[in-house]
Image (cartoon, rainbow, N blue to C red):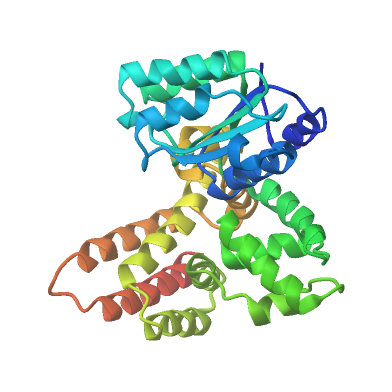
């Protein structure tokens, strides 16, 4: 029938269908939950829900129970809602998979059926692919992966209205940069901000006061200080993270990404390659984070390619040392900060 996103689902639910099948999958848990909640709110039976509503955890009940729920007719009502949750297709045998496919292709009249996967499923999973392809053709499928930065901003601004506050797009981007791109966590932070703001606008000052910065955001500030030649700030920020017992290996891993982004952008620009090609070539790294490539393309002109190569060489050497049991990891990380700052001063 159709592949839907959240906006298209809203329009479809307004049509109040008698019989329909929805397959909700993808990598973003928050959006999948939102989709299932929307379908449930729209189609929950008004009459005798104790007979006409089933929500089953696929991994906690036997398949005969699932099959019984999928084949039962509405009782004393025109509508029945069935949610089969937490499906892990890797554990479904061929016979049971065919039963699920039959239920999706030929649902019981008057039944709204929702299938939801347990987690993001690889396209290489043959059972998932068979069911997904069937649902694209005969049902409504929603593949809800983590949104990009613009998508996160739109969701946060819309969500702020539903919780009685107002978040401007620029401040939504600021919240994302400060707290990270996990949508479930961002919505939790937004609820906290809305409760504090009341009917007022959510401001950056509120975000700074109420929302703890993610480790990625804190490490990015170290990278930014190094790139701008602010050694004292880079050392202060690094010391703060180490005092908070953040692992040097984790700090270095995040930091390396900041410099590799710039190097890739610089090399691509020099070769006349567009940022979209870089995002596609490293899709596993930049899935839902294309803004990192865009930002790197914007900023890389300020740094010679030789300097970026030197930065990465120093980071790689430090990474090797941090994997040695004989190395004092905190001291080695601080030594790296001094090496990076010195390289920037010498090679600009």
| Residue drawn at x 57%, y 71% as measured from the top left | 228
**Residue that lies at the very extreme toward the left in this rendered image:** 326
**Residue that lies at the very extreme toward the right in this rendered image:** 199
Kindly tell me whether residue 274 is visible in this rendering: no
Q: Is residue 101 left or right of residue 145?
A: left
202 versus 21 height, above or below: below
Kindly tell me whether residue 345 is visible in this rendering: yes
Number of marks present in the image shown: 0
53 versus 113 height, above or below: below
| Residue drawn at x 50%, y 50% as measured from the top left | 261
| Residue drawn at x 42%, y 25% as measured from the top left | 128
Q: Nearer the viewer, residue 192 or 176?
A: 192
Q: Nearer the viewer, residue 150 or 156?
A: 156
Q: Position of residue 205 (x, y in %)?
A: 74, 79
| Residue drawn at x 33%, y 16% as measured from the top left | 95
Q: Position of residue 91 (x, y in %)?
A: 31, 31
Q: Is residue 127 left or right of residue 299?
A: left
Q: Looking at the figure, which quarter contains the N terminus?
A: top right
Q: Nearer the viewer, residue 340 or 16?
A: 16
Q: Nearer the viewer, residue 324 or 263?
A: 324
Q: Position of residue 97 (x, y in %)?
A: 39, 20
Q: Is residue 156 left or right of residue 62?
A: right
Q: Position of residue 57 (x, y in %)?
A: 44, 42
């Amino acid at each position: 029938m159709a592949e839907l996103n959240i906006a298209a689902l809203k329009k479809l639910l307004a049509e109040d269908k008698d019989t329909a099948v929805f397959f909700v999958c993808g990598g973003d848990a928050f959006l999948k939950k939102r989709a299932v909640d929307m379908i449930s709110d729209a189609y929950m039976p008004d009459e005798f829900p104790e007979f006409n509503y089933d929500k089953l955890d696929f991994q906690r009940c036997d398949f005969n129970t699932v099959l019984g729920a999928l084949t039962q007719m509405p009782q004393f009502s025109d509508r029945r809602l069935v949610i089969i949750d937490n499906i892990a297709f890797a554990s479904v045998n061929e016979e049971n998979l065919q039963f699920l496919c039959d239920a999706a292709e030929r649902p019981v009249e008057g039944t709204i059926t929702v299938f939801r996967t347990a987690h993001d499923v690889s396209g290489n999973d043959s059972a998932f692919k068979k069911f997904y392809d069937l649902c694209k053709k005969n049902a409504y499928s929603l593949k809800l992966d983590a949104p990009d930065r613009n998508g996160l901003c739109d969701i946060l601004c819309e969500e702020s209205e539903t919780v009685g506050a107002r978040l401007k797009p620029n401040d939504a981007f600021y919240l994302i940069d400060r707290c990270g791109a996990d949508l479930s966590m961002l919505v939790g932070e937004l609820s906290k901000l809305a409760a504090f703001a009341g009917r007022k606008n959510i401001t950056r000052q509120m975000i700074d006061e109420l929302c703890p910065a993610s480790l990625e955001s804190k490490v990015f500030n170290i990278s930014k200080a190094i790139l701008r030649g602010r050694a004292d700030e880079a050392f202060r920020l690094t010391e703060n993270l180490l005092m908070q017992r953040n692992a040097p290996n984790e700090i270095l891993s995040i930091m390396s990404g900041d410099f590799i982004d710039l190097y890739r952008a610089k090399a691509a620009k020099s070769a006349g390659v567009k940022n979209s090609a870089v995002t596609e070539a490293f899709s596993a790294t930049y899935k839902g984070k294309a803004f990192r490539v865009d930002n790197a393309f914007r900023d890389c002109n300020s740094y010679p390619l030789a300097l970026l190569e030197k930065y990465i060489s120093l980071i790689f050497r430090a990474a090797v040392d941090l994997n040695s049991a004989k190395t004092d990891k905190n001291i080695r990380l601080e030594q790296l900060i001094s090496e990076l700052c010195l390289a920037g001063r010498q090679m600009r």
